[in-house]
Image (tube, grey):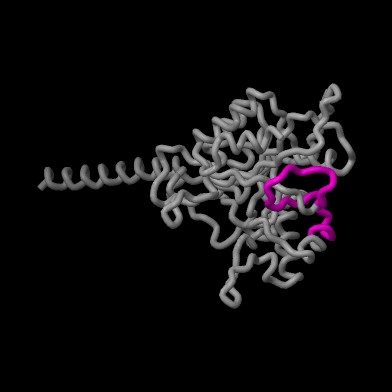
Amino acid sequence: MYVKVMFAFGFVSLLGLLFVSFGMVISKYDILAVEHQGPFPADKRLDVCEQTTRMRNFETSNNEAANIPVLLYHRVIKEKDISETHYLDGQINPNLVTAETFREQMSYLKEKKFVTLTLDELYAFLTEGKAIPENSVVITFDDGYKDNYIEAYPILKEYGFHAASFLVTGSVKKKTQPFLPDKVQYLSQEELKGSCDVFEYGSHTYTFHKKETTDGKDIPFLAAKSEQEVRKDIETSFYQLNDNDFIAYPYGEYTPETIKIVDSLGAKMAFALEERNASPVDHIYEVPRYPISQSLSFEEFKGYVDQ
């Protein structure tokens, strides 16, 4: 009887030890972290590094840029991690480039001694005639995917490059989760803060990176929703980013009313999608960008930046 009791006690103790050990593993990787329901709370600011004006004076030696390519990336995934989830209608998702392709492109920029501008430097060039080196480029990312931190950030840091990330602020996570490349994951506050030596942050709306179907057509929220709703959404994202004043339009689509709203909210610049360089003749709320996809050849990429 005594032996049976001791065995039972030992078994229970072992189970308890296993649960504690398992709990420690779970806690370490935050697998069971309770995520906030719905979007990041509208009345809360994101806990990111303080964004300050980043401005440098350049020695141009009469080789000043007349216009500047602005590159747009979305997701960056290692080639070995590409799966069927990264395909649409039999083709690789156009919003994706492999980490190997991204490194090749960044290596080329480094080899050619390109300067990666901050948003404030681009703004000063476009509006104030600031002298910018001829071999200048602006690197931007849309949406705020977790893989930007896992895959793109180390490469950018290695080459000493700067980039801007336009966040759907409502999608930012409170807790940092394990990276699952076959899933759509968004950056956490910790990851935002941990990458601000490379990235600065702008708005990609609060929750309006969506479309609604009207008369059989998919219309982006910025064009489909009322002026009041659009204003409230963008204003919320600016507030969450500590009154940051740069925005990229979801899907690159907007209306004259959208421009009036971002202007009234004090935005410095707004970014669209158009395959040409940005120049001082462009409207400051319609800055063009080159979308970079995996289907873009290396020669085409060089054509974008070597103009």
> Residue at 55% of width from left, 58% of height from top?
36
Q: Is residue 276 magenta?
A: yes
> Residue at 57% of width from left, 50% of height from top?
174
Q: Main secondary structure of the magenta part?
A: loop
216 in relation to 78, above or below: below
Left or right, 210 with respect to 136, comes to left
Quadrant in the rendering for residue 222: bottom right
Which of the pair 220/267 is nearer the observer?
220
Which of the pair 52/107 is nearer the observer?
107
Q: Position of residue 219 (x, y in %)?
A: 63, 68
Q: Quadrant of the C terminus?
A: top right
Q: Is residue 127 magenta?
A: no
Q: Position of residue 260 (x, y in %)?
A: 82, 62
Q: Which residues are magenta?
A: 262-284
Left or right, 301 with respect to 225, comes to left
214 in relation to 35, above or below: below
Which of the pair 202/281 is nearer the observer?
281
Which of the pair 145/88 is nearer the observer?
88
Quadrant in the rendering for residue 251: bottom right
Q: Position of residue 35 (x, y in %)?
A: 52, 55
> Residue at 45% of width from left, 51% of height from top?
91
